[in-house]
Image (cartoon, rainbow, N blue to C red):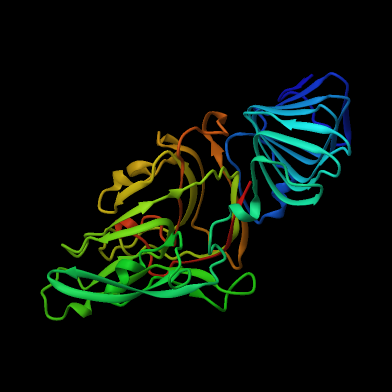
Amino acid sequence: MELTASATLPTYDVTVTGDHTLTVNVEGRNSPLSVDERYKKFVAGTNGRAEFVKELTLTGGADLAVKNGYLYLSYLEVGEGSELSGDSGRLVVVNNLTVTSGASATIASGLVASCNNLFLANATLTVNGKLYYGYVFSGDAPSGDVAQVFNAQLPYSDFDNWYEKPVTGRLLEIELSGLSLSVGITGSTSPWVSANDGAALLGYNPTTPEEEDTPVRGKGCKMASQAVPLTLLGLIPLPFSEVFVAGNLFLGSYDNTLLTNLLGGAQITFGIPSEGRLPIALTGYYKYLSGTIDYIDNEQKTGGADSMDLYIALATKPYSVDTSDNTSFPGGSSGDLASDPNIVAYGRLTSSETTSDYYYFYIELTYKDNNFIPSGDLYLPITATSSKDGAQFTGSTSSVLYLDELSLVF
């Protein structure tokens, strides 16, 4: 039996029994789901999305197949001989995945499945595909390509830990040094980097820890766009007295400050090895104060409302970016992640809305061509900025983006 886009999905408990396969073809479905209601700001991907709001039970060898998008289940119980499979589909069990006591069930090759809670008392779950889980409440965690969600998170994504990192550079033959406020702990390796490594040479840190205005206890990340004065350069004749710098934060590395001229920008790397991570979403809290654009190409000109930008992607390569070359960014000069052939999955939140408080957000990833198990080595870029066009020295000196408690959803 196959449920297609024209079928009405049940709003009651469903049991499938015997030698039958329930196939849920998600293609063409994109209506809001109950899980969306948890979030103040929800950004859905373009893959199909469907949901069973009650419990689905498979008994007597019945199977479940997911096709062409995300299938969200509230609760799933599977019995002896049941197989969970996917044909360009992804299975998300929001609450409990239970294998009936005494039974053996299988996650087939080609399916990525996830659940919050696993119940495997006196039961066996064979994972030939991939499984993410939150907690095992009974029985033992299955073997195979299995990951606990807690262990798949990115270090320091709560932004509670910061340290000062010494940086040096040369500008117009002048030796400069500074202290870059950085996410992490001294002596540790943190995947999070910002343009502070360049701005600190002029005595400024646009990205800083936030200790007072946070959505939860602890610190957060504050990104403030600003015009950085060039007074440290003394009496050297300059074409302008300030450089517009956006607050930002990204996964990757800050490789070099291009200081052969005042607007040289930087060489940075966007993306870190995904190490098998195949997230379905990025969640966290953000708050944004949008200002009126007062710098365009580093000239004091007035534009419209500034916008924050936050995106996540999976790519087949890391991006070696020269900020003076728009074509080197993910998505090229247009920033269009969907058309970039090196990006296999992406999600993005861009907004000019000023928020009075923190918004709990959910950015769902779109997996291109419903390919939920991309092949080869993958890289994970996540980038946030208080001014979307800050790399082009365009934005508002009044724009501030607060970010906290980032988490990958599987």
The relative height of residue 379 versus residue 193 in the rendered view (above or below) is above
The relative height of residue 175 versus residue 403 in the rendered view (above or below) is below
Whole-percent x, y for residue 343 in the image = 44, 38
Whole-percent x, y for residue 334 in the image = 36, 43
Whole-percent x, y for residue 281 in the image = 59, 47
Q: How many marks?
A: 0
Horizontal side of residue 106 vs 204, given as left or right: right
Q: Quadrant of residue 20?
A: top right
Assign the N terminus to one quadrant of the image: top right
The relative height of residue 408 versus residue 343 in the rendered view (above or below) is below
Q: Quadrant of residue 241?
A: bottom left
Whole-percent x, y for residue 237 in the image = 10, 74
Q: Nearer the viewer, residue 130 or 258?
A: 130
Q: Nearer the viewer, residue 60 or 342?
A: 60
Horizontal side of residue 54 vs 5, given as left or right: right
Please tell me which residue is depicted at 30% across the width and 43% down the height of the picture: 327
Horizontal side of residue 391 vs 48, given as left or right: left
Q: Nearer the viewer, residue 34 or 293?
A: 34
